[in-house]
Image (spheres, rainbow, N blue to C red):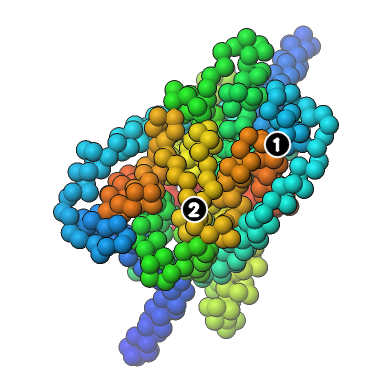
Amino acid sequence: MAQVLDKPVALDAPAPDARRTARRRALLEWIAVHALGVAAALFFTLPFVFVLLTSLMSDSQALSRDLLPHPWEWDNYQRVLDTPGFLTWWRNTLLYAGLGTVLTVVSSLPVAYALAKFRFRGRNLALMLVISMMMLPPQVVVIPMYLFWAKQLDLSGTLWPLIVPMAFGDAFSIFLLRQFLTTIPNEYVDAAKVDGCGDLRTLLRVIVPMAKPGIAAVALFQFFYAWNDYFGPQIYASENPGAWTLSYGLESFKGMHHTDWNLTMAATVLVMAPVILVFFFAQKAFVEGVTLTGVKG
Amino acid sequence: MSTVTLAAKRRRAALRTIAFLSPWLIGFAVFFAYPLLSTVYFSFMHYDGFRPPTWSGTKNWTYVFEHYPFFWPALRNTLWLVLVMVTLRVLFGLGVGLLITRIRTGTGVFRTLFYLPYLAPPVAATMAFAFLLNPGTGPVNSLLEKVGLPAPGWFNDPAWSKPALTLLALWGIGDLMVIFMAALLDVPKEQYEAAELDGASAWQRFRFVTLPNISPIVMFAVVTGVIQTMQYYTQPLVAGKVASGVIQGAGTMFEPGYPEHSTLTLPQLVYNLGFQRFDYGSACVVALVLFALSMAFTALLMRRRGGLIQAGD
């Protein structure tokens, strides 16, 4: 259809003059679009640049209005790492994010598979409940949950109240994986069944290899969630600095160093950097995950 | 086939389904249904965590709505954020999405640069902005003064604290940018060609081709934006703490909302009532308000035709 339409237009070739103005307009548009692009890029990157520059200033210079450090105090990063607690927070964060991610993937995958491929009564209801849980602010149930973990199990001051629930399926991960699994044609499941595969074998041997990008996206999101979580550690770990995570400890860092913006910004860089590094290694899976939860409606 | 084996088969299928769903079934019961019912229960009890809970009728409810000084400011702030922050985020996200689909040179680099701020951990991003926007020595005010513009107090001025939070939210536009970008690339090319043949201007092409095609995504962005605003917690709390200069060591108390209640949001009230004032009952009242508001908008999201549920079926 489009080709049929194209032909007469192409035959009706524009005069050289018209073509020149068209080309000039295209060039102007290119310049305008890319100028806007550069302006936007400045808006998005300058905050990072200022933070980095400040993190390399001396204590007194960080309080001045200078924009460039002189001399460059690379030592600031060593001072942050030497701060008591900082490495503990780092270890706690890795434990929370790492173990939490593994537990989430393992517990969410079978649920997502059942919601995507099994036919049973109440499936839509279950899915609606999953979405409701996904949209539930954690503060809604925090009072009974805190009483449960702190008063009944005596686990406040640790990260276990945040890690253990991840062994019981995370609503967002279930939803994202379910979205991904529905895109895998049922024929693969049926073929595996004809070959005598049980449900668990089908999931592990047939579905998991095909769902790797979805699993990677879920793992990434979960890792970032735990890395960024502030409310959880604030509720359960605040009383015990030995259980703090980076996101929670970072803020108290400002308290310890009062006006030392240079050290605070160095700590900020150290909290941001791992997330950004992970992103560069897994960019594709991540962006796929964002579009999967949003658009594929 | 006899009915007995058919029934057995069906029972096996049901067991299989339950087995696969079991992690979530337990999670649903223990971490959702039970605490939710418990929240309702506690909202009618007086409980400070030390003495056993006692029945207090609707006292917590009247306290929160009529006497608790933070409730209405928090609700007003949420309304402000929904009207201004969500609107600007959707417009800006669409704008950046349109821009990125038109950039022909270095697309990958631009896209990554635009996306990166979204990844910055909220606490770190808020600390960064508290520094950038600090009225004394912050680089933003230095630049504004240099070019002769007025330098606002940002996180230290009740009139400017929410605009400062909005700026922070616009910086992290990456999620919406990706979603809008995908939607814009999905608009059928033929429709643009047809519009062009009909002599439609750029604005008309946007208004009559682009917009109708992406309107479900705009709707999605608005509703999820509203839900996120209900849950807005870390950024306003940390911004208030850093700007006020009241940061712990453990044990120091920060009344959220600095400056002058201007950064209060509903989730912060749950923390304030429950974990600073040890009034668990009233905290549960706010939690239920938060629950009702979130679920109302979630229902809106699910009712939409072709919405979240239909995907892939």
Q: Position of residue A81 (x, y in %)?
A: 73, 51
Label 2–label 1 contact, CB within 8 A: no
Viewed as shown, does residue B140 lie left or right of B30?
right
Above or below, comparing residue A253 to residue A114 in the picture: above
The residue most toward the right is A71
Residue in view at x 35 percent, y 36 percent? B74
Q: Position of residue B208 (x, y in %)?
A: 49, 25
Nearer-N-terminus badge (2/1): 2
Residue in view at x 52 percent, y 45 percent? B248
Residue in view at x 61 percent, y 61 percent? A92
In the image, B234 versus B174, the foreground residue is B234
- As helix, strand or loop, the secondary structure at mark 2 comes to helix
- The residue type indicated by label 1 comes to Asn
Instruction: Give the letter of the chain under mark 1.
Output: A
Above or below, comparing residue B146 to residue A114 in the picture: above
In the image, B143 versus B14, the foreground residue is B143
- The residue type indicated by label 2 comes to Gln
Residue located beneath label 1 in the image: A262
Above or below, comparing residue B106 to residue B282 in the picture: above
Residue located beneath label 2 in the image: A234
Instruction: Give the letter of the chain under mark 2.
Output: A
Viewed as shown, does residue B241 lie left or right of B115?
left
Q: Quadrant of residue B189?
A: top right
Quadrant containing the N terminus of chain A is: top right
- As helix, strand or loop, the secondary structure at mark 1 comes to helix
Task: Give the CA separation, mark 2 to mark 1.
Answer: 25 Å
